[in-house]
Image (cartoon, rainbow, N blue to C red):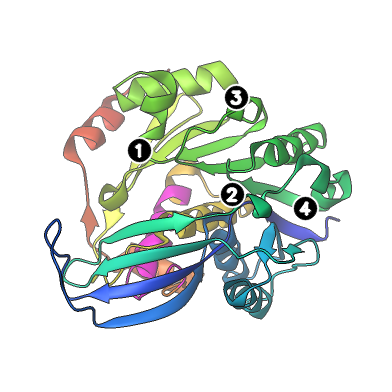
Amino acid sequence: MPQFDVTGIGLNATDTLILLPKFPAYAGKIAFDQEMYSPGGQVASAMVQCARLDLRTKYIGTVGDDLRGKIQMESLEGSGIDISDVKVVANCPNQTAYILIDKSTGERTVLWQRGDCLRLEASDITEEMITNTRLLHIDGHDTAAVAKAAAIARKHRIPVTVDVDTIYHGFEEVLPNVDYLITSSEFPTAWTNEKDPFTALSLMQKTYGMRMAAMTLGAYGALALSEGKFHYSPAFVVNCEDTTGAGDIFHGGFCYALLKEMPIGEALEFANALAALNCTAIGARGGISTEAAARNLIARGERRSNKEIAARAAASPSV
């Protein structure tokens, strides 16, 4: 039996949150209300959500040896995540982001930096790191490393999920070994040059043969193509304090749903619920919640739907 339910390989970051009463106009000036450190990063935060859902979880990545790196390591370890294969890089600052949060809307603007000293190399990934897990979750930043990990997973029939929002050089080496692709709303169009999201997702699935090609739609939920059918899941309406990390938590929830063998529609709804709950508190991991909380929101929560996408998904024939 594999030692871990899910292993994540990819980015972490330690954010500096700057809370603003409202975002100033361009070239404007405003006093901020509060400043705080907050651990985040897309794969690391997804793994924290998985751990919160009682999955046996491992994170593999690089961390700087500065204060921000220490904050990140304490957060991961405190969440019960195995960090035995995290590489702490000497004399290297951890990835950081300054996140400006508009308290009037919960929306945020991100300024980030990651030094080359934090690069995860393909040589850092061994077969033993991958074969002891039931599911592998990756991003695309250190492309050669995640491509190697995904290839190992495919060889051993371990499903691979990926979170990607930027076109990375060499990412075409990753996609053939991805089973569940969930991108930002912009990525499929940028990758395929197809403006229509339905066409773009269909082309990506046809080209690379993944089981599911999907995109998150921010405040409007998620759209996925799986088993020849489009599935649309609206977002949940909550009292939003901060949207930081919502997509990361969506991925963590989706990993859990896959391992629990939920149907795709239910998996998307469950992931949407956890993403929404995370937005009810400040920070990338501020509102990480339980399965019970997600089920309660699903049962009682109000949805926000993109009517055009919902109608097209409902009417879509098998493709």
Q: Position of residue 150 (x, y in %)?
A: 71, 37
Closer to the eye: label 1 or 2: 1
Label 2, secondary structure: give it. helix
Q: Which mark is residue 258?
A: 2
- Residue that carries the numbered disc 1 in the rendered image: 185
- Determine whether label 1 and label 2 are within 8 Å by CB: no
Bin the neighbour count of mark 3 within 10 Å (Cα to Cα): few under 14, some 14-19, many 20 and up.
some
Q: Which mark is residue 172?
A: 3
Closer to the eye: label 1 or 3: 3
- Determine whether label 4 and label 2 are within 8 Å by CB: no
Q: Decide which of tag 1 and tag 4 comes sooner along the chain.
A: 4
Label 3, secondary structure: give it. helix
In this rendering, the answer to whether 146 lies above or below 258 is above
Closer to the eye: label 2 or 3: 3
Quadrant of the rendered structure where residue 107 is? bottom left
Amino acid tagged 2 = Leu
Q: Which mark is residue 133?
A: 4
Label 1, secondary structure: give it. loop
Q: Main secondary structure of the magenta part?
A: helix
Amino acid tagged 3 = Glu
Q: Decide which of tag 4 and tag 3 comes sooner along the chain.
A: 4
The residues colored magenta run 267-285
